Image (cartoon, rainbow, N blue to C red):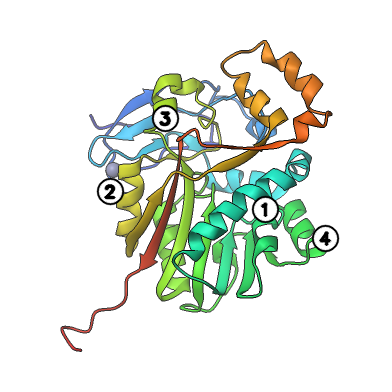
Amino acid sequence: MLHSPPSYSPMFEYVDCNLCGANDYRVLYPSTIDETSAGALSYFRQSDPNNLNCRIVVCNRCGLAYSNPREKQELLNDVYRSVEDEEYLKQRSWKEASYRWNLARLERHVAGGRLLDFGCGHGFFLSLLGDRWDGYGVEPARAAARYASEIIGQNVYCGFLDEHNFDTGTFDAVTMFHVLEHVANPKGELGRINGLLKPGGYVYLEVPDLGSVLSRWRKRRWWYIMRFHTYYFTRSSLLRIVRAAGFELVDVHRPVKTWSVAYLTRKATAFVPRLAVAERVLAPSRLGAVNVNVNLRDILGVIARKERPSYGGAG
Ligand SMILES: [Zn+2]
């Protein structure tokens, strides 16, 4: 079914499928926000338990799911520049434990070199890179970028990827942890990353998996259904978009996460609301700060290699 837009607030825009370009979709979940009203931006908090969502549609041609209509890119960009999430700093110990897992996974394929972490947040991942790596970060959130460069001491550029003139073909690895589902043009960003990598360089992506058992069970109450997720990948659509950007897949996996007991309890309130009481008790306690490894299998990790140019049969 082809669609023509009804009139919404000028803050919203309709978009075609980012992967195949079609305007041919079915609605997966209806919108739970009022697109006719302004003031959208105040809703944004990564830790906001109120999972509002734009209308989510699935492309009939290629299966990519995306928010449509969605907040305009310039508004989203303003949100990302101004967001401050102090909660995040308290989560450093277990975020780092998760990132250590990611780094070990990446190092199975590439042991060192120049690395760019796009959407590096407060620089936690960069801070774990050992001497073998020369790490750089790009982060649009001003507060997080400042923290990463001033407090953690990393090479972090504030802004979006296209606002910085990194030399093309100079990185051995680019990482994007829970970033691709936020961008306005994932195929374009992956193409840009492909250009930044050396031939044979690696990209490591981590995104929520819309095709996971938890997602299909919880439907629009799945915790990754949220207003500022512009794309919702499944294993199939993620692999297609990565290949379309000039990569070959080398490692598709379910990353292990480390959470504090308090955070685990908070996640569990999605199923058992009464646990909110327990979370309030645990949050400031020593037990609440204990870290545990979990794998709910609703996240996809993909490591892919930039294809080397072929020389027409030479060699
Ligand atoms: Zn499509």
Mark 1: amino acid: Gly
Which of the pair 265/88 is nearer the observer?
265
Kind of element beneath mark 3: strand
Q: Quadrant of the C terminus?
A: bottom left
Residue 18: tell me if it is visible.
no
* Above or below, 164 relative to 2: below
Kind of element beneath mark 1: loop
User: Looking at the rendering, which quadrant does residue 100 occupy?
Assistant: bottom right
Residue 151, numbered circle: 4
Marks 1 and 3, the one that precedes in the sequence:
3
Relative placement, left or right, of 7 versus 19 is right
Say which residue label 3 marks.
Answer: 56
Q: Quadrant of the N terminus?
A: top left
Residue found farthest to the bottom: 315
Marks 2 and 1, the one that precedes in the sequence:
2
- Cα distance between the residues tagged 3 and 2: 17 Å
- Cα distance between the residues tagged 2 and 1: 30 Å
Kind of element beneath mark 2: loop
Residue found farthest to the top: 274
- Quarter of the displayed picture in which ligand 1 can be seen: top left
Marks 4 and 3, the one that precedes in the sequence:
3
Residue at the image point whose x is 58% and y is 25% from the top: 51
Say which residue label 2 marks.
Answer: 20
Q: Where does the image place residue 151, in percent across and percent down from the top left? A: 82, 60
Kind of element beneath mark 4: helix
- Cα distance between the residues tagged 4 and 3: 38 Å
Query: Of circles 4 and 3, which is in front?
Result: 4
Mark 2: amino acid: Cys
Marks 1 and 4, the one that precedes in the sequence:
1
